[in-house]
Image (cartoon, rainbow, N blue to C red):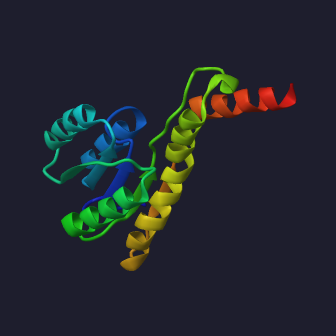
């Protein structure tokens, strides 16, 4: 994408780290930005920071693993901005505990965010990008922490 002005981005995990950096970069390039995060306090702080740069910001408290919440978020973005051009599936979850000490609830949470969050993003937001025929992009972020988590699983499987 070469022309950012007026385009719309939706970023999960948008209240800190890479997500917030993407949001700030997009806003400074003239984009309208929706950020989503589960952590309300961080979300509020990120929204305030972005609003100092642009009035075209929407912050949504969303659990990306919950398909109903992601469906709601896609409707909210469409109602607020009308279109979507960039989807950033950036939310991530990990644990530093040894993989064989995690319980099912912890694994469900990690997989819910890291896998279902991306699937929910694609299923609910990609149709918004395709609907206006102006093109767009999908960015799926994967961190070293997630690779480390998979590495821990591999080591256990090889024992």
Q: Nearer the viewer, residue 150 or 82?
A: 150
**What residue appears at the point 34 percent right and 33 percent down from the top-left corner?**
16
Q: Position of residue 142 (x, y in %)?
A: 56, 41
Q: Nearer the viewer, residue 89 or 25?
A: 89
Instruction: Mark yes or no: residue 159 visible.
Output: yes
Q: Position of residue 21 (x, y in %)?
A: 36, 37
Quarter of the image with the C terminus in it: top right
Quarter of the image with the N terminus in it: bottom left
**What residue appears at the point 24 percent right and 71 percent down from the top-left corner?**
82
Q: Position of residue 35 (x, y in %)?
A: 30, 48
Q: Position of residue 97 (x, y in %)?
A: 60, 20
Which residue of the protein is positioned furthest toward the front in this rendering?
104
Q: With respect to residue 113, does 6 lie above or below?
A: below
Q: Nearer the viewer, residue 134 or 113?
A: 113
Q: Quadrant of residue 2?
A: bottom left
**What residue appears at the point 35 percent right and 55 percent down from the top-left corner?**
10
Decide if residue 88 is on the left or right side of residue 15.
Answer: right
All told, the count of numbered labels is 0
Which residue of the protein is positioned furthest toward the right in this rendering?
159
Instruction: Mark yes or no: residue 2 visible.
Output: no
């Amino acid at each position: 994408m070469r022309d950012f002005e007026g385009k719309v981005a939706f970023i999960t995990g948008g209240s800190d780290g890479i997500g917030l950096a993407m949001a700030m970069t997009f806003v400074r390039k003239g984009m309208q930005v929706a950020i989503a995060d589960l952590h309300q306090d961080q979300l509020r702080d990120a929204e305030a920071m972005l609003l100092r740069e642009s009035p075209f910001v929407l912050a949504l408290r969303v659990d990306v693993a919950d398909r109903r919440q992601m469906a709601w978020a896609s409707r909210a973005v469409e109602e607020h901005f009308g279109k979507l051009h960039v989807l950033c599936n950036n939310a991530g979850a990990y644990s530093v505990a040894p993989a064989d000490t995690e319980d099912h609830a912890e694994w469900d949470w990690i997989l819910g965010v890291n896998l279902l969050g991306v699937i929910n993003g694609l299923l609910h937001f990609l149709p918004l990008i395709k609907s206006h025929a102006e093109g767009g992009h999908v960015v799926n972020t994967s961190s070293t922490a997630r690779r480390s988590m998979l590495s821990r699983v591999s080591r256990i499987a090889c024992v």
